[in-house]
Amino acid sequence: MIVMLGLGCMALGAASSIRNSNFEAYVRKHYTEALKQMERHQIPASIKMAQGLLETGAGQSTLAREHHNHFGIKCHRSWQGKRTFRTDDLPDECFRSYRSWQESYEDHSQFLKAPRYRRLFTLRYDDYQGWARGLQQAGYATNKGYANKLIKIIDDYELYALDRGRLPSWMRNETTNTSSKANRRAKKEVSYDKPMRPSYVSYGLLYVLADQGDSFDKVAEDMGISAKKLARYNDAPLDYPLQEGEVVYLQNKHRKATAEHTTHIIRIGDSMHSIAQLYGIKLKSLYNLNDKDEDYVPVEGEVLRLR
């Protein structure tokens, strides 16, 4: 069956990124509170962690160190607590000051319950891309790359695992994790007589669409292909939780887009990985075509070369 589709977005994990030790230390210190807040207020732990990392520079900002403000929340009319003044969009703007970083995490949850953010709570609990886009669209920050920065942090540090009650792979016990994967592989012999999933072709590439709750292991079992190869073909970590409708390529992607796609205008929520998936090109090639490194974060309105 041959169809040409607009391909869905899919996050890039940390497998191809160089992680920052300060970011890792911040996650280790604060992730349990983010999980508590998710259970209490239904705000994805990945979003909570990514905003904390971004707003504080991994806890290094003066606002975080001296005033425990981890989310850059300004005073607004309703704030009755302590205050501090900093230059942000304007000189001497009023920011909230807290007694502890835990208090900042709780206040952030309460802050997101304002009417302007209400529609975010209609999203799936693990739709961190939707949350990131919604925060920018609702005006949480004025930076046009805010959503894309959040998504990149979540992807690079595998924070999406927290939304499913798991730890990112780099935080798990390495021996246990390796053993667990080996056991799963030992139990899953590839079976070629099982029914295969419907497959499609776009840009000359064979792919399938992920089901709800899918994984590379499940797709590999159905399609008679190595899960490790699938992860490599799709520039993602092996344990990345696929979203329903996402594209899973069954072969290596191209080095450049097809002739009719020469450029891409960046939208809110785009990541370099989602753009690479959209046009069926290798992530590394997309970086090279635009003279970018892995620290680059797409900004709404910018134009990227595809060939």
Image: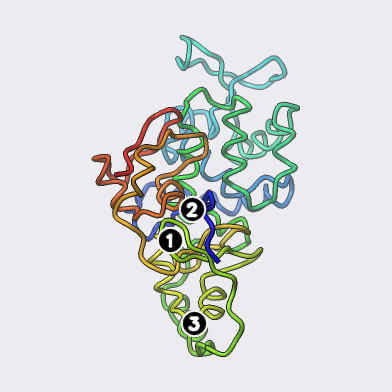
Q: Nearer the viewer, mark 3 or mark 1?
A: 3
Could you tell me which secondary element the residue under label 3 belongs to? Answer: loop
The kind of residue tagged 2 is Ala
Q: CA distance from mark 3 to mark 1?
A: 19 Å
Could you tell me which secondary element the residue under label 2 belongs to? Answer: loop
Residue on which the image places disc 3:
224
Observer-nearest of 111 and 69: 111
The quadrant of the image that shows the C terminus is top left
Observer-nearest of 253 and 96: 253
Q: Are marks 2 and 3 in contact (CB under 8 Å)?
A: no
Residue 116: image x %, image y %?
71, 26
Judge from the rendering whether residue 270 lies leftward or rightward of residue 163; answer left or right: left
Residue on which the image places disc 1:
236
The quadrant of the image that shows the N terminus is bottom right
Q: Earlier in the sequence, mark 3 or mark 1?
A: 3
Residue on which the image places disc 2:
11
